[in-house]
Structure formats: C-alpha cells, structure tokens
Image: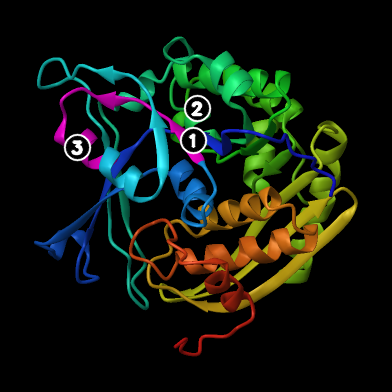
Amino acid sequence: MSLSLKKNCAYSLLVPSSMGIRITPVNGQPVHSSHLFEMQATSAETNVASISSFLGLPVKVLTTFVKDSPIAQFIKSDLKSRHIDYEGPEVAQGDPWGYRHQFNIADSGFGSRGPRVLNDRAGEVGRTLNVKDFDLERIFGKEGVQIVHLSGLIGALSPETSNFCLELARFAKKHGTRISFDLNYRASFWKGRDKELREIFTEIASVADILIGNEEDFQLCLGIEGPEAGGKGIDAKIDGFKEMIGRVKKAFPNASVFATTLRQVISANEHLWGAIMLEENNWQVIEPRKINVLDRIGGGDGFVGGMLYAILREWEPEKWAQFGWASGALATTFLTDYAQPADEEMIWSIWGGNARVKR
C-alpha cells in the first residue's frame, strides 16, 4: 500500500468542522408546503467521519459551540450517538443577534422535482474556529492521529478557519499524520478572498497525501487547467478527468491518491453513480451504475468517508474506490445526510448488488 499509516494513535480520523442543524420535511414535500420537520445535527466533515465511527474506528471532531445553547446540547448528544468524540471551546452567544449554529433547510425532492437547499449561516459560531483554542501538539504529538481530513468548506469559511486548517496541515505533516483534502469550492465563500485562499489551498494541497475534487474544484481552487473540450458521454468525461489529474499530480507530487465521484441525475430518486481514483500510477474507474435515491445530500461525503475507512483498514487500493462508491450509495438511502452502516457487510452488499433480505 502506498500510504503507510502512523501506528498506536488515539484517533484513526480527525476532522475540523462547523456543526449545524439540518431540518427537512418529514413527508418528502417541499419546504414551503410543509408543517412538520425532522431535525438533525450536520456538517460535511462529520458526514465523512461517520463511516469510520459507525464501523468502530476512533474518530474526533474539532469544532466550536455556542455556550448554554440547547442546539449545542443537541449537537453534542448527536455526535455521541455516532460514536464521535468532540473537542472545542464554548463561545457566549452575546445579544440576540450574536452567535448561533448554522441552519440548513432542505427538502429531498421527488421524481421530476429536484431537491432545494437553503443555507442560513448568519452568525455562524463555527467561523470563530481558531488555532489558539486547541493544543495541537497534544492532539498530534501525544494522542496521535492517523489521518486528518480537511474540507475546503471549512478552509474558506473565515480567515480564522482558513488559518486553522493550514496549521492542522502543518502539524499533521510534522507528526507523520496523513492528510486528506477535499477541495469543495464554494464561490460565495471565496468572494473577495481569491488570492488569499488560493495561496492557503495551494499550501495545504502541497502537503496532502489524498486530494479529492471535481473539475471545477481543481481549476478554481488550485489553478489547474481543466479537461479539454471533447466528445460527450461518460468515456469522454473519464478521459478528460484523467488528463487533468495528470496535471494535478505533476503540480502536487506529494499526493499519491486522487479521487472524484461521477453523478448523472435521471430523477431525484434515480441516479447513475460512479467514481474515479488514481493511486500512485494505478487507475480505479467505477463506471456509473444506477442507484435508487431517497435523499441525495451526503452521497459525496459518504464516498470520501468509505474510501478513507478502507485506507485506514489497510485494504488493497482496488477496494478503496469500491468501498467508497458503495458507502456513497448507502448514504443516499438515509434521510440523514450521513450513512449509518450497521457493519461492513451492509456496504459490501451494495457493491455486490445484493439487496436481498438478510435474516
């Protein structure tokens, strides 16, 4: 395996994150037509971490909470139920216009009606996530971490979180922790900060061992030339991505794993789902296969989470992409935006196309 992992660590996976709340209609209806909603704790990074935590690996999230907030209490209880340890400061709300946890308001869509998502991030306490609030020498040096997973969502959330992710990458590199970086470009986060964020993302990518992103991510975050315009269809898309990854690999030679998902939407409840992964010089291509979708949000995070779990288990690289693909497919069968696997067999059964009843 190309990625040798640090041994005797307290945590297999560590993620920095801004925790929030997601509310969705209970009956699959649009938000504006609904009166009853389910509430869950959410963040893209803990969606990734949940694959490993549900399957028994020690996982930790570094985050920040609003002091004395019932929403913060709800989030902490939810993380505990997912077997995820947490660490982070308590920030006073201040006045009624002060800090709070972000809200994500979404419906799942149905058939020909696509999902709609509204992010309400005003006053988001996660934007205060700051390196001064954590003892990184203890976390990486004494406790030990095998993989730290960084997301461009947190990396671009605020100047404080950008610096925090950069320092996490530096400490991880110093202590032999592997670094996973999902670029996750968001135009609204980058507005007015393009030069600053390009420099930060480039430094993180230069020390990363695993780089994840689509064509837009690599172009807009790192300035890599995108795929050349060519023929239509999935084969052309795969060939174009391979060419671009060659340029990414040349620009960032420290990384040995590159990955992305492929998705074609037939309807809200039927997608073609695939993946591409390059490990060293070996391509793993999963051509899109039909999956049935209950709620699409979190499928990409499930893919990353499954791939990282397979790496942590030190399986053969071929299985990294397979387990990631199946974990992403599993996530789309849950109303939560994270998968909750009962065991590895549940995920491998999806890869094998076995949906028969298990008694």
Instruction: Say which label, 1 or 3, has the lower sequence index.
Output: 3
The correct choice, above or below, for 107 with respect to 267 in the image is: above
Q: Which residues are magenta?
A: 59-75
Instruction: Say which label, 3 or 2, has the lower sequence index.
Output: 3
Q: Which residue is mark 3?
A: 71
Measured as percent of width and height from the top left, residue 17 is found at 44, 33
3 or 2: mark nearer the eye: 3
- Whether residue 20 is visible, yes or no, is yes
Amino acid tagged 3: Ile
Measured as percent of width and height from the top left, residue 337 is found at 39, 56
The residues bearing labels 1 and 2 have C-alpha atoms spaced at a distance of: 6 Å
Q: Nearer the viewer, residue 239 or 353?
A: 353
* Classed neighbour count for the residue bearing mark 1: other residues with Cα under 10 Å, few (<14), some (14–19), many (≥20): many
Mark seen at residue 153: 1
Measured as percent of width and height from the top left, residue 109 is found at 32, 68
Q: Which residue is mark 2?
A: 156
Q: Secondary structure at mark 1?
A: helix
- Whether residue 103 is visible, yes or no, is no
- In magenta stretch: residue 68: yes
Amino acid tagged 2: Ala
Q: Residue at x 15, y 25 (%)?
A: 68
* Classed neighbour count for the residue bearing mark 3: other residues with Cα under 10 Å, few (<14), some (14–19), many (≥20): some
The correct choice, above or below, for 346 with respect to 183 in the image is: below
Measured as percent of width and height from the top left, residue 303 is found at 58, 57
